[in-house]
């Protein structure tokens, strides 16, 4: 008898999941995802609405839904349906939930020792507490229990996060409805991969979008829109839960179309995509394109007395193979070495409009060293002074380099004079006098 009960429950759950999957495929779903752990979900479904009033359910919504943001509308008969009451139900089926529903009722337990214990269930949190027919109370460690026999599945348990409405319906029972809501647990960001050529003159740049779905719902064959930009919210979003994630690389066919939208940029995927719960999906944003770049060396001695920074500079223009509004994200830079590639640096870019310049901080030059020395300082008036500074750059590379020297002073200042000489495999000195007023 126990075996039959287990098979029946398993078959029932399989049937529920199968029906849910078939229904989901027939729904029209649009998911708009923002950078800040927020998404707007639109769904259109065929529902059976009670007449003249009654309760209807809308299953498989996001577990992290904001119930106050839900909007319900009948597309078939907009003026015939009104929502009188709304509830968000998330009392999902689990062993603990089922046992809680059997408090003060008779249950039968099977122990590891092979015996059975019957009684009225008084507590199901942690150790189980049973009262036998003779009035004695037994406290059982849950780890000692191997099976629990219950007469039936309690009513009212929910197998999926569900919106439940009390509606007034003056139209037909079968109607097509649209439901929209905000949810946390969905976020996206851009990531870029750049490969330099042998002479560091060109960069093959490709962009990917990573979508992280931890909202507690799967959206099959959804229309996907991504909003790049920072929107103002009246309340800070909740943090993402720490759950296991599945990484999936989506097919590159059918990429994103980008356009301006309000004060942001909107990226619409030209094909449907399935967003599974607890999954990170990656979709190609821009295909690899050759972009001319300029490598620069910069020394800022007042902030870092020894290091010379290496940067790459290029323009986000159509002429350079780009010209797309680039969403913020991390760029990883590689350079070929034989048949492999070696990571040479990483940087983050902000949201970058088309035709704007990008500067990537690659790292510190190994063979170029800087040194900053203050030679003299004198007062040049009540609110003025003059400072003489020497900058020395030592180049241990096999080729000559040009280093940009940055300087910072407070107040109004000008550089009076400077000298520069750059020998091969040697050193270069810059000596200048700064006149400053305040």
Image: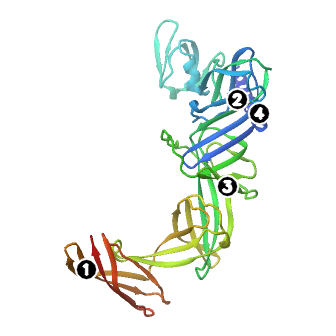
Q: CA distance from mark 3 to mark 2?
A: 28 Å
The numbered mark, 1 or 2, whose residue comes first in the sequence reads 2
Which type of secondary structure does the marked residue at label 1 adopt? strand
Circles 3 and 2: CB atoms closer than 8 Å: no
Q: Quadrant of residue 1?
A: top right
The numbered mark, 1 or 3, whose residue comes first in the sequence reads 3
Q: Quadrant of the C terminus?
A: bottom left
Callout in the foreground (1, 4): 1
Decide: few, some or many residues near mark 2? Use Cα within 10 Å; few <14, some 14-19, many ≥20.
some
The numbered mark, 3 or 4, whose residue comes first in the sequence reads 4
In the rendering, which numbered label is found on residue 23? 4
Q: Is residue 243 left or right of residue 51?
A: left
The residue carrying mark 1 is 386
Which type of secondary structure does the marked residue at label 2 adopt? strand
Q: Position of residue 342 (x, y in %)?
A: 57, 73
Residue pictured at 75% horizontal, 56% vertical: 254
Which type of secondary structure does the marked residue at label 3 adopt? strand
Circles 1 and 2: CB atoms closer than 8 Å: no
Residue pictured at 56% horizontal, 64% vertical: 331
Nearer-the-camera pick, 117 or 227: 227
The correct choice, above or below, for 66 with respect to 57 in the image is: below
The numbered mark, 4 or 2, whose residue comes first in the sequence reads 4
The residue carrying mark 2 is 73
Q: Position of residue 216 (x, y in %)?
A: 61, 38
Q: Position of residue 273 (x, y in %)?
A: 72, 48
The residue carrying mark 3 is 259
The numbered mark, 3 or 2, whose residue comes first in the sequence reads 2
């Amino acid at each position: 008898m126990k075996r039959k009960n287990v098979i029946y429950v398993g078959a029932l759950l399989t049937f529920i999941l199968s029906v849910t999957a078939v229904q989901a495929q027939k729904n029209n779903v649009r998911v708009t995802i923002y950078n800040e752990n927020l998404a707007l979900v639109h769904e259109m479904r065929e529902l059976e609405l009670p007449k003249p009033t009654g309760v209807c359910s809308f299953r498989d919504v996001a577990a992290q839904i904001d119930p106050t943001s839900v909007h319900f509308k009948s597309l078939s008969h907009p003026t015939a349906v009104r929502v009188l009451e709304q509830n968000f139900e998330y009392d999902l089926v689990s062993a603990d939930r089922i046992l809680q529903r059997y408090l003060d009722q008779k249950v039968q337990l099977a122990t590891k020792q092979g015996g059975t214990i019957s009684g009225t269930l008084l507590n199901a949190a942690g150790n189980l507490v049973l009262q036998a027919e003779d009035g004695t109370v037994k406290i059982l460690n849950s780890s000692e229990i191997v099976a629990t026999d219950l007469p039936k599945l309690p009513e009212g348990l929910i197998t999926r996060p569900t919106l439940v409405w009390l509606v007034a319906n003056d139209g037909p029972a079968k109607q097509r409805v649209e439901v929209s809501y905000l949810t946390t647990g969905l976020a996206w960001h851009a990531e870029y991969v750049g490969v330099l050529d042998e002479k560091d003159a060109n960069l093959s740049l490709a962009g990917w979008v990573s979508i992280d779905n931890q909202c507690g719902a799967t959206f099959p064959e959804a229309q996907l829109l991504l909003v790049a930009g920072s929107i103002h919210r009246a309340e800070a979003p909740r943090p993402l839960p720490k759950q296991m994630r599945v990484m999936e690389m989506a097919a590159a066919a059918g990429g994103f179309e980008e356009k301006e939208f309000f004060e942001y940029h909107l990226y619409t995927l030209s094909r449907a995509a399935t967003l599974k719960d607890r999954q990170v999906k990656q979709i190609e944003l821009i295909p690899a394109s050759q972009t001319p770049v300029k490598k620069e060396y910069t020394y800022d001695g007042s902030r870092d007395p020894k290091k010379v920074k290496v940067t790459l500079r290029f323009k986000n223009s159509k002429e350079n193979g780009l010209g797309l509004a680039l969403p913020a994200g991390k760029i990883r830079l590689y350079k070929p070495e034989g048949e492999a590639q070696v990571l040479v640096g990483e940087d983050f870019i902000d949201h970058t409009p088309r035709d704007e310049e990008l500067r990537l901080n690659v790292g510190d030059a190994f063979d170029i060293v800087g040194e900053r020395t203050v030679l003299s300082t004198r007062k040049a008036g009540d609110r003025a002074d003059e400072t003489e500074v020497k900058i020395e750059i030592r180049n241990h590379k096999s080729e000559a380099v040009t280093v940009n020297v940055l300087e910072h002073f407070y107040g109004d200042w000008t550089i009076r004079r400077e000298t520069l000489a750059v020998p091969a495999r040697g050193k270069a000195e810059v000596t200048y006098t700064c006149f400053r007023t305040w």
